[in-house]
Amino acid sequence: MKTNRRSLFKKISLGLAGLFGAGVAKAGTSAEKEVTGTVVMDQEIPLFSSAIVHNGFVFIAGKGAHFEGDIKAHTKHVLDELQKELEKAGSSMEHVVKANVYLNDLKDYKAMNEVFRGRFGKKPPVRTTIAAAGGIPGDSLVEIDCIAVLK
């Protein structure tokens, strides 16, 4: 029984690793990741990249809104920034398969949804939404990251 579970777990793990480019590259393919967005350089070694294309996927780092405003203004700004990064990387809002939404306060859930609805086309991505304990860095009311497929 243990052997079957281990075998199944190994198959699932390798499949997921391959999906996200963490597995072994196939012969003749490149496992290199391409940084398409800006790299945040506040140190000699970058803290993070804003967007990376890898194995047919675009990974966009969390975007926030760092200005005075309400949740609707912040959500619109963040979604506009995601759209710019996706298009720059060769994808679009309609190609997003996964989004994570981090709210400063869960009371903003309904108003955020009013702006979020329809921005990803008729078939929205799967989504996780949480209220971040301690708030969002930079005093943003919302932060969103996503994963998309290339066009």
Image (cartoon, rainbow, N blue to C red):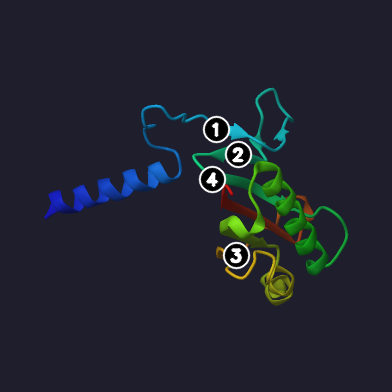
Spot occupied by residue 28 in the image (x, y as percentages of width and height):
40, 27
Q: Residue 33, labelled with which disc?
A: 1
Q: Are marks 3 and 1 in contact (CB under 8 Å)?
A: no
Identify the mark nearer the N-term, 4 or 3: 4
Q: Of tags 4 and 3, which is closer to the observer?
A: 4
Q: Is residue 5 left or right of residue 144?
A: left
The residue that disc 4 covers is 57
The residue that disc 2 covers is 52
Secondary structure, mark 2, is strand
Q: Of tags 2 and 3, which is closer to the observer?
A: 2
Q: Of tags 3 and 1, which is closer to the observer?
A: 1
Q: Is residue 124 above or below residue 29?
A: below
Amino acid at dot 4 = Phe
Q: Residue 130, labelled with which disc?
A: 3
Q: Is residue 75 left or right of residue 45?
A: right
In space, the residues marked 2 and 3 are separated at their CA atoms by 24 Å
Q: Are marks 1 and 2 in contact (CB under 8 Å)?
A: yes
Identify the mark nearer the N-term, 4 or 1: 1
